[in-house]
Image (spheres, grey):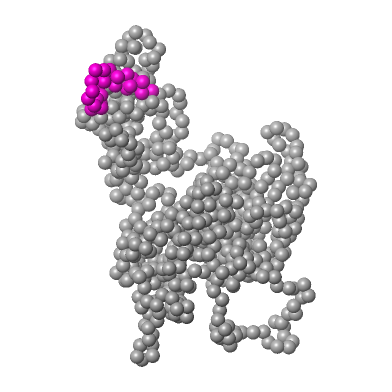
Amino acid sequence: MDPQKVRRGLTTDGFNPFRNMTTSYSMWPVILMPYNLPSWKCMKEPFSMMSLLIPGQSAPRRDIDVYLRPLIEELKELWGDGVRTYDAKNEESFRMHAALMWTINDFPAYGNMSGWTTKGYLACPTCNEDASSQRLTREQILEQIETGTYKPFEKHPNNRKRQKDEIPVLNWAKRSIMFELPYWKTLKLRHNLNVMHIEKNICDNLMGTLLNVDGKNKDTEKARIDLANLKIRKELHLQSRGDGSFMKPPAVYTLSTKERQGFGAFLKSIKYHDDYAANISNCVNTDSGKISGLKSHDCHVLVHRLLPVGMHEYLNNEIGMTLFELGNFFQQLCSKMLLVTDLQKLEDQIILVLCKLEKIFPLAFFDVMVHLVVHLPREEILGGPVQYRWMYPIERLLGMLKGFVANKAHPEGSIAEAYISKECTTFCSMYLDGFETVFNREERNDDGGDHGLGLAIFFQKVHPFGLISRAPDVPLHEREMAQWFVLYNSFDVEQYVQEHKNILQNGSTCDTTERQRDEFPKWFKECINQLRNQGSLEATDELWSLANGPSAIVNTYSGCISNGVRFHTIDRDNRRKTQNNGLVVEGKHKGHSMRFYGYLRKVWDMTYLFRHRVVLYQCE
């Protein structure tokens, strides 16, 4: 990718700046995201650019093209003539060109930007006219006509004559202004389906139907009537009573009150890793079994991990396995790296998963948001990982803009002034040294970074914290076991381990693993001391320090940051809402490689000669 050719994505979404939904106001910032930056920067807030701020009492809807006109004119200029720019590194000027790769929106805004009406029979823009949904019957159409509200006849202010060029073509409501860009019609992916909102809608459908939530349950009386009209799933048809009323038979996918309380208790008991998810237990009422106030990322975690596991106890195997397959699909889709062949397999798998869901849930469950899942693998093949095409970072940016509103009489001015001030301070902080800024301050899980050259075992990327004690009375057998573990897993000692193993195996057919564990530390110490007495360069200070073993005094800690990951001991985690004590280690048992699972009991900090140190985890 040529760094002098800028590639950007465009996103827009509306929000209420007053944090009060009773006040009708909708503000739409238009934000450009740079894709020339490294992958860990391109979606971050300091590097995004708010190009427009559209105010108003209501959303701009299809008229958003009017506000986008200045931006489109600048994008056409950047594509054609370019802008003369100075390269400070190479100390030369060049013509910088820029292109818009795609837009990132939720589904309603997708319709505003693309011109395709995302409602009705042809709501899916990818399927277009090849939609395969169920059409209404003649009687249903007549019922809608009788109960509808229409414009008055003859002359009326609300009436508007159809223009001559106003010929509806399928679901196209307009020709998007984006097509004025010379390259727009050649792009294979112009508008992205937002995985974040699709996951949330599917989670709402699942939770509402499984937990029988009023207003969100898709298993309604009308849904049961649809099944009767289609003459399918007879066990779910409404049953008439003698008094003329109807009874809705319970479905296998609907949880009872006791089961809902059990699922709520499961969510209450879950602890998440540090910085993995919000505390979902705050949204759970175990007495009533109700779950409310879930955010988009909460739904992301539920669909991926918690819903299949938590519901497995209360649903039959068919439904449980289908939920597992759906969660596995989204886990793979949201991976940071996937092969094209894997995505092609996901395309086939999700069709089977949806077919299984159709055999379980009523027809009303399958709205357009559920259908859009079918097209997500194809979009990932064209556009790459979803982390650069979903709205999580944009939603966080909108939250920041909402916090800029200080003068409620002029919210646009407050946001504009605060945003310009923040842009100035952000720019200055990139080049100013000597004090802490957002670009040079220490990360929350900072492990200390590289410490220097020498034996790798002495230069671990670790930062223990939460000192428990300085233990001078650590049992001798525990210190010997720790020393053997350090030596056996040290890359610089491998040749000595192999040499000692060959000595033990000379003329012996027995397993020497236990014997080597007992005898190697002493043999290694004698070997290095002998080399050091001979003045050999092989016996460096670091190797000699390692051979002589650690001090009898061992510092123990309740937490440690290693390679940017935070670990806590189980005693520390018992007092916290998060859980960071779990560990999995690759090892060997009886000559076979296997994984060992456990939890962290203590963090050992062992000191050696020349102030070297090694940090170990004591696990169970």
Q: Is residue 84 left or right of residue 379?
A: right
Q: Residue at x 61, y 38 (%)?
A: 431
Query: Which of the image's four quarters has the C terminus?
Result: top left
* Residue 8 sits above or below residue 601 on the image: below
* Quarter residue 524 falls in: top left
Asked if residue 217 is among those painted magenta in the image, a careful observer would answer no
Task: Tell me residue 383's x, y (percent).
Answer: 59, 51
Q: Residue at x 30, y 43 (%)?
A: 598
Q: Nearer the viewer, residue 479 or 106?
A: 106
Query: Which of the image's four quarters has the N terminus?
Result: top right
Could you tell me if residue 296 is visible in this image?
A: no
**Main SS, magenta residues:** helix
Looking at the image, the residue that sits furthest to the bottom is 243
Q: Nearer the viewer, residue 449 or 115?
A: 115
Task: Tell me residue 441's x, y (percent).
Answer: 51, 40
Q: Nearer the viewer, residue 27 or 337?
A: 337
Looking at the image, the residue that sits furthest to the front is 231
Task: Tell me residue 164's x, y (percent).
Answer: 78, 75
What residue span does the magenta drawing correspond to?
492-519
Q: Residue at x 47, y 60 (%)?
A: 352
Could you tell me if residue 1 is visible in this image?
A: yes
* Residue 450 sits above or below residue 439 on the image: above
Task: Tell me residue 210's x, y (percent).
Answer: 39, 68
Q: Residue at x 41, y 61 (%)?
A: 322
Asked if residue 497 is among those painted magenta in the image, a careful observer would answer yes
